[in-house]
Image (spheres, grey):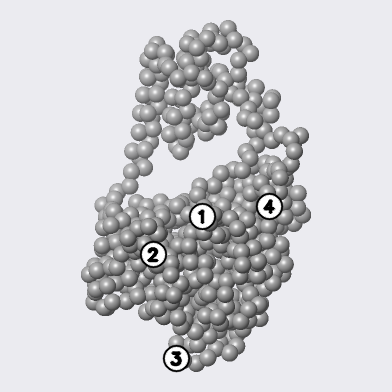
Amino acid sequence: MPCLEILKLREFSLGLRNKLSQLNSFNFPFLPHASCLIPCLRQVNFHYLEASTPVMKKLTVFFFLLGAMQQSVAQTAVIDSSRFPRLTTFTAQQDHDHMKQQLGIRKLRPGRSGNENAPDHANYDESLANPCPELPDALTLNKGTKVTNAATWMQQRRPELIELFEKEVYGRLPKNIPAVSWHVKATDREVVNRIPVVAKWLVGKVDNSQYPLISVEINMMLVVPANVKGPVPVLMMFGGRPVFPAPAQPSPDEMDKLNAAFKTMMISADPPVKAIFDKYPAYQPITRLAGPNFFAPAKAEAELTPQERLLAAGWGYCTIETNSIQADNGAGLTRGIIGLCNQGQPRKPDDWGTLRAWAWGAARGLDYLETDPLVDARKVGIEGVSRYGKAALVTMAFEPRFAVGLIGSSGKGGTTLHRRVFGEAVENLAGGGEYHWMAGNYLRYAAEEGVSGKKTGCDLPVDSHELIALAAPRPLFISYGIPEKGDAKWLDQTGSYMAVIAAGSVYKLLGGKDLGKSNDYRMEKIPPVLSGLLDGELAWRQHDGGHTDAPNFTHFIPWANRVLK
């Protein structure tokens, strides 16, 4: 087909695609098939980039009418914002300053640089890493009484620790969190690495009737193997926007129908286009994408993704988009679920931070999974790496329905001890780039001058070993890589290992098994790389890769199958 003719078709299709995408959220009775045309338009097979002026003149009128219809409908949905508190818009710096003002902090100590060559680089001298080597005792009540049995832990000590973590570190959940209504947006039967799966795109709509200026819709994708009998265990994974792993495509006969309908639509909007199609009757604007090749060699074991490994082992997985719950920046704290609950106003010092909000979103995702017959709701785990590793640990600590956790390279705010001064520091978490993860009160522990005086991580009444202990006796797998491959010293792997060792006493009290070492965190040394400690409900393994937990999935899955009874 000559270039000019293809160009005419292309420009019409691209313009129509854009307009239909915009109109797709409205219910037009005269465009009943707009939503089904969008996927077709994405697959239109065009090869050139320039436009035909006569065609564009005709399309201008068409698109103008579509735009006018869209604007008319949109105007009917305008919210009377005068009925609600005004939405606060801060930059991250403004929000950070506002929190410091509430706390009476005049000066914060700056965070350290991860660049070892920078003049303000973080400390990497182990001899300087423990300014306050004595950790708070996880098994001593606030009044000084020792905890010697599971009942005292569950009824007294655990609530004490939750109160301290909520007030000083991660923030409290508000009492007015609105309900979430889940619906299945799309279901697809697909094939992932030769395994048949059922994939469901799920959206959790948060009730915003009390403050309609903010809308929150939680995005989640559930993928379960279709070749396994009964409900399956599922690992929820924090991350970005979820996508279908291998979307199914129409059959050749169905593609013929789509092409026929597409040609009819184009001809109706621009009748001269019919002459082009008549001239090239075999031309099909919409083509199939390349599908799986079942004759190709199987993927090498080393090439399997964590998701493929889960499916092969009879597990499902569920990816949840953190940004659909709460944005990962300080400027977003008056939006998302935190902003919705605060009706667009800034946080108070003990309000929840982003890590706690993500954990709340994961729990709402679990609400849905408990209703899905494909899922064994007694065996739903949570996973994350880096900041998502922090969120996964917070989820395990505060949401007891999660059965198992895989905590990857979480660093400070996750498994690493706060009072350790090695790599990332309390001052970094309290700085303008990370403070939104934490409660506002956490900033006080980086204060150099203020109404509460100077404070450091040594002044914290709790530390990360106690956060790990809040998950006990449920299984918890702590994963790290090595600095040489990109899992930087900044994360303080040693500080994490110390915390896991210290948390072991609580696991043993509750009838679980820890790493099989003593609980003397000052004496025990981090084991060699690749020598996992996987015999108990509390597990540790440092792989020889980078900032990822993928190399540990070959160990996590059989471990989880064993400890999930």
Q: Quadrant of the N terminus?
A: top right
- The residue at 71%/34% (across/down) is 293
- Badge 3 amino acid: Lys
Residue 372 picture quarter? bottom right
Residue 105 or 206: which is nearer the viewer? 105
Disc 1: CA contacts within 10 A as few (<14), some (14-19) or many (>=20)? few
Q: Disc 3 versus disc 1: distance between alpha carbons?
A: 44 Å
Disc 2: CA contacts within 10 A as few (<14), some (14-19) or many (>=20)? many
Q: Which residue is mark 4?
A: 309
Q: Nearer the viewer, mark 4 or mark 3?
A: 4
Mark 2 or mark 1: whose residue is earlier in sequence = 2
Q: Secondary structure at mark 3?
A: loop
Q: Which residue is mark 3?
A: 143
Q: Nearer the viewer, mark 3 or mark 1?
A: 1
Disc 4: CA contacts within 10 A as few (<14), some (14-19) or many (>=20)? some
Q: Which residue is mark 1?
A: 486
Q: Disc 4 versus disc 1: distance between alpha carbons?
A: 23 Å
Percent coordinates x, y for residue 264 in the rendering: 55, 18
- The residue at 45%/81% (across/down) is 133
Q: Disc 4 versus disc 3: distance between alpha carbons?
A: 48 Å
Mark 4 or mark 1: whose residue is earlier in sequence = 4
